[in-house]
Image: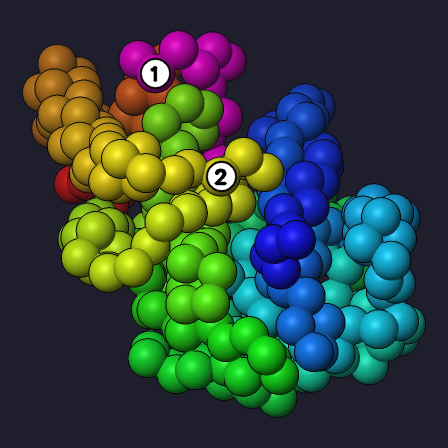
Amino acid sequence: MRRITPIPLNFDLAVSPEKKVTRQVCAFAVLGKDLCLIDTGTAANEADLGRALARMDRQLSEIQMVIHTHAHPDHIGCNARLAELASPTFAAHPAAARWIENPDTHCRERAVHNFHEMVGGAVSVKNLLQDGQILDLGDITLQIIYTPGHSKGSVSFFCLEEETLIAGDAVPQLLGIPLYVDLDQSRASLEKLLNLKGVHRLYTSLSPDPIEGNGIQSTLEEGLAYLDRMTALVKATQARMGGETALPELTAEVLRGLGLDPPPVMPMTLQTIAAHL
């Protein structure tokens, strides 16, 4: 039995005050001597997490550590409830810990229309993760790999024992809404993961299905190519609309060019398009 198990979680994201879309994010159970959970979904996902762990003959109250790929609402939303049920140690990169411990600040700086539906509350982050650090979970370890770009505090996790890389949202989604804050960092993170040795299985937060074999390299290379295509689309759209076009209008037109109509113009997509300018 593999000791890293994806847990797909569905949640509603408000892309405007009037419209919500259903999206999926994956948490991951790491079944070492200590039960560790990577990310927690949203506040509405408590029962989903409990059912998934029950299928592994485990329960929420056994979770001893929660570690985060980053601090976006769909990855930290159930933290406060898990703190009540299990009192785990929470771990994250320092740049992510600030938002995990201060949801109101998080909401102000990266507003999501239904933020407070998604995030159940604050927790204290006791373990600040650093690049290259090894987390020892008893009979299984996780190496921390700093992979910013999608957010300032994004990290990936490499499990040598399982030859498995959990990349969170470091790989840009090739379909749907583009979401990252720093283009150069996104590219550097993908190249860093491409150079990582010993990876035979790759998971992202977007799907419970593993990527294996040659698909790992091609997936990471597709991510790099996607960033190039986005740059070309943004530049071409800006040239067509004029260099003085306001960012919201430019963002709307770029998103339409990706087939997103009505375009979800919101702080997170404004940041993405601005990263290309």
SS at badge 2: loop
Q: Residue at x 46, y 67 (%)?
A: 161
Give the mark nearer the N terminus: 1 vs 2.
Answer: 2
Kindly identify which residue carries mark 2.
210
Mark 2, Cα crowd under 10 Å, few <14 / some 14-19 / many 20+, is some
Q: Position of residue 126 (x, y in %)?
A: 61, 88
SS at badge 1: loop
Q: Residue at x 68, y 27 (%)?
A: 22
Picture layout, residue 10 above or below residue 60: above
Specify the segment rendered in magenta.
257-271
Q: Position of residue 193 (x, y in %)?
A: 26, 55
Mark 1, Cα crowd under 10 Å, few <14 / some 14-19 / many 20+, is some
Q: Is residue 244 left or right of residue 106?
A: left
Q: Is residue 197 left or right of residue 176?
A: left
Instruction: Name the quadrant containing residue 36.
Output: bottom right
Instruction: Name the quadrant containing residue 233.
Output: top left
Q: Residue at x 65, y 72 (%)?
A: 32
Q: Position of residue 113 (x, y in %)?
A: 65, 41
Picture layout, residue 263 above or below residue 113: above
Q: Please state which of residues 255 and 84 is positioned toward the viewer in this rendering.
A: 84
Is any atom of residue 47 visible in this view?
yes
Amino acid on which disc 2 is placed: Pro
Kindly identify which residue carries mark 1.
258
Q: Residue at x 48, y 60 (%)?
A: 162
Q: Please state which of residues 173 and 16 is positioned toward the viewer in this rendering.
A: 173
| Magenta stretch: helix, strand or loop mostly | loop
Q: Please state which of residues 112 and 63 is positioned toward the viewer in this rendering.
A: 63
Picture layout, residue 277 above or below residue 170: above
Amino acid on which disc 1 is placed: Leu
Indicate whether residue 262 is drawn in magenta: yes
Answer whether labels 1 and 2 touch (C-beta < 8 Å): no
Q: Position of residue 102 (x, y in %)?
A: 63, 73
